Image (spheres, rainbow, N blue to C red):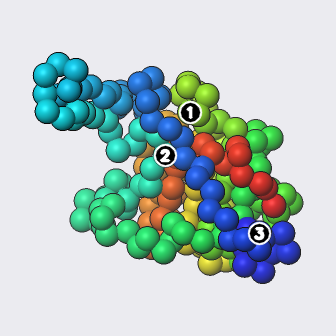
Amino acid sequence: MTDDSPSAPASGRIRDISVAVREGTPEWPGDTPFSCRWSWAISQGASVNVSAMTLSPHVGTHADAPLHVRDGWPGSHELPLEAFHGPAVVVDVSGARGPITIDLLDALAPLRRVERLLLRTGRTIAAGTFPDEWPALEEECARALLGRGLRLLGVDAPSVDERESKTLPVHHMLFDGGRSTWRTSTCGGCARAPTS
């Protein structure tokens, strides 16, 4: 919710909308899957229990860093944490068939100003499978949202761009504008968050 939204919770409640990472959490096809094992176990004579994990940083809920799409851009450790904390607007676009346009968003939830926007596409990995397709943002939509003050865009789909995109125009546009993207694959818990 935005600060000026009449439906913004007075409690300022923080909601965890992340997808739990476990064996079988879908990864982007071809990427490194999640695995976890015991390196040492008390039950096997060790003095402590110590586990080891292997995974891609793109398994489960995560924030893309600009470095993800261009060498020399900031890495995850350089992202401003302020963008990831605060009121957000959740818009359900699960009925979208095709690209997400600014006209569609305006019809669902008129956004004069928006800092943090979470889009519920319904094409999430939270159910345990990697979706074949999802509605991606149009470049013009991303441009319009940047003009309305967007600092953070979260989606429950594996990408803000189309699955087969090799140029990732929406990623580049958002990062060129100094914005952060947060996805589950990025916001699977958006299914549990109230919409505007």
Report the residue at 77% width, 50% height from top: 92
Quarter of image, res 31? top left
Towards the viewer: 14 or 90: 14
Q: CA distance from mark 3 to mark 1?
A: 28 Å
Is residue 29 found left or right of 186 in the rendered image? left
Report the residue at 41% width, 73% height from top: 80
- Describe the element under mark 2 as helix, strand or loop: strand
Q: Position of residue 77 (x, y in %)?
A: 30, 64
Quarter of image, res 1? bottom right
- Describe the element under mark 1 as helix, strand or loop: loop
Report the residue at 22% width, 20% height from top: 43
Q: Earlier in the sequence, mark 2 or mark 1?
A: 2
Give the residue number, with chain letter if any, for mark 2.
61
Q: Amino acid at mark 3?
A: Pro
- Total count of labels: 3
Give the residue number, with chain letter if any, for mark 3.
9
Is residue 160 found left or right of 112 in the rendered image? left
Q: Is 39 placed above or below 165 here? A: above
Residues at discs 2 and 1 in contact (Cβ within 8 Å): no
Q: Position of residue 9 (x, y in %)?
A: 77, 69
Q: Position of residue 155 (x, y in %)?
A: 60, 50
Q: Position of residue 79 (x, y in %)?
A: 38, 68
* Labelled disc at residue 125: 1
Is residue 81 found left or right of 152 in the rendered image? left
Q: Mark 3: few, some, or many residues within 10 Å (few <14, many ≥20)?
A: few
* Labelled disc at residue 8: none
Q: CA distance from mark 2 to mark 1?
A: 9 Å
